[in-house]
Image (cartoon, rainbow, N blue to C red):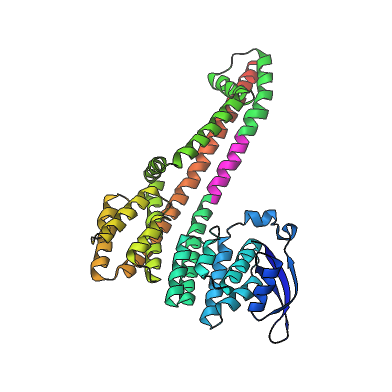
Amino acid sequence: MPRFEYIAINSHRKTEKGTVTAESAFSARKHLRGRGLHPTDVKQVRMETAKKSLGDFLRRGNRKAVANFTKELSTMLNAGIKLTDALGVLTQQISDSQLRAAITEVRDKVVTGESIADSLAEYEQFFDLIYISMVRVGEVTGMLGETLATIAAYMEKRQRLEAKMTTVMIYPVFLVFVCLIVVVVLMVWVIPKITEQLLKTGQQLPWLTTTLMKISALLTSWWVLAVIAGIVAMIVLYKRLVRTEKGALIRDKAVLGLPGFGPLLKQRILQRFTSTLATLMGSGLSMAESLRVVSQVTGNRVMADAVKKARERILSGSDIATPLRDSGVIDPSIAHMITVGEKSGELEQMLKMISDNLEASSDLVIERLSAIVEPVIIIVMAFIVGIIVFATFMPLFQYSTTQF
């Protein structure tokens, strides 16, 4: 639907500027008059003015901006400011142009009487299923401000945990990248030149040097294109496979079975599950509805199937811990804690405690893995580069000794 910029006189005879979504300029003027405004200028926002920059596209779905918007909106609502007024103020403060445009349209829809949850649901690149479900409950119960504060806290915690994982991975990935560049430069540019000189000597070359020369020749030949094409084909095939339910299930099972990283990923999945479930229950969602939402956002097919089975058992009047334990994702001790929390009526508090314990435990595992992985990468890469250098210069040393 087109968007129109307007200049209007309000009931206090002051000039007001903004945007409104409508089918036509006439509908926009009619809508503004219904809000008690007298429009003096209404013009449609052209495509070139609404066009997003490359930077905005790369920041699409900026979760930090969404979290800040949620926190500020919560603060305004809890201070007694009307929802439409709060949204209007925030449209002037949001720096992310895509999010600002989305909130502007949300405000226009809320003004016309639409539910804010339904309005936000149209912008799923910013607001996921958890966000919309909690906003819907807050809107119905009349506690939208408190609910938004809970959502903001949940989002900040998620971002903090993801930032830890990213920070830990940056240095090892950088090391691998730099070492691979060094190896490629040696194999593609340095080795061929040295090989040419070695062949001119006519001496018998060590098998290690000969093997290195063959690998270098392969990398500088047309065969490398066939290898790259094969890798690309495998990646495409893999992506198509994991789009199917069976393929995704096989992948997620394999990921959880990885030595070293498997247990860490399992802890992360459990921490996200318990934290999300506790947050949804705390916002007022029923257990069955909370499990339905969590099953769609776990990020792991094994966990999603277990949560779906748990939901089915809840609807049939049974417990939730047994199917989660049977899935193999949740340890018996955690399943027992969930059972205790369920029987005592303190499941939400128990889930929060489990989430905090898992977060602390996974942080410790991350620190240990980081301390182990970085030296291992350095040693392996140094060994590879050392082998290349040794295989390259060993014939030169042999040739020089035979000349004296």
Q: Is residue 180 above or below residue 217?
A: below
Furthest-right residue in this view: 41
Between 99 and 274, which is closer to the camera in this rendering?
99
Does residue 61 lie above or below 191 as drawn? Answer: below
* Residue 46 belongs to magenta span: no
Range shown magenta: 170-183
- Asked whether residue 26 appears in the rendered view, the answer is yes
Asked whether residue 181 is drawn in magenta, I would say yes
Is residue 164 left or right of 215 when viewed as pictured? left
Residue nearest the observer in this picture, 289 or 177: 289
* Quadrant holding the N terminus: bottom right
Q: Residue 401, located in which quarter of the rendered image?
A: top right
**Residue 271 visible in rendering:** no
Image spot of residue 145 (x, y percent): 49, 76
Q: Name the image quarter holding residue 27.
A: bottom right
- Residue at 37% in and 52% down: 304
Could you tell me what secondary structure mostly forms the magenta stretch? helix
Q: Position of residue 88 (x, y in %)?
A: 63, 75
Q: Nearer the viewer, residue 87 or 179?
A: 87
Q: Is residue 366 left or right of residue 125?
A: left
The residue located at (58%, 73%) in the rendering is 112
Q: Position of residue 294 (x, y in %)?
A: 39, 58
Image coordinates of residue 126 in percent, x first then y, are 55, 60
> Residue at 74% of width from left, 57% of height from top?
48
The quarter of the displayed image where residue 351 is located: bottom left
Q: Residue at x 61, y 25 (%)?
A: 216
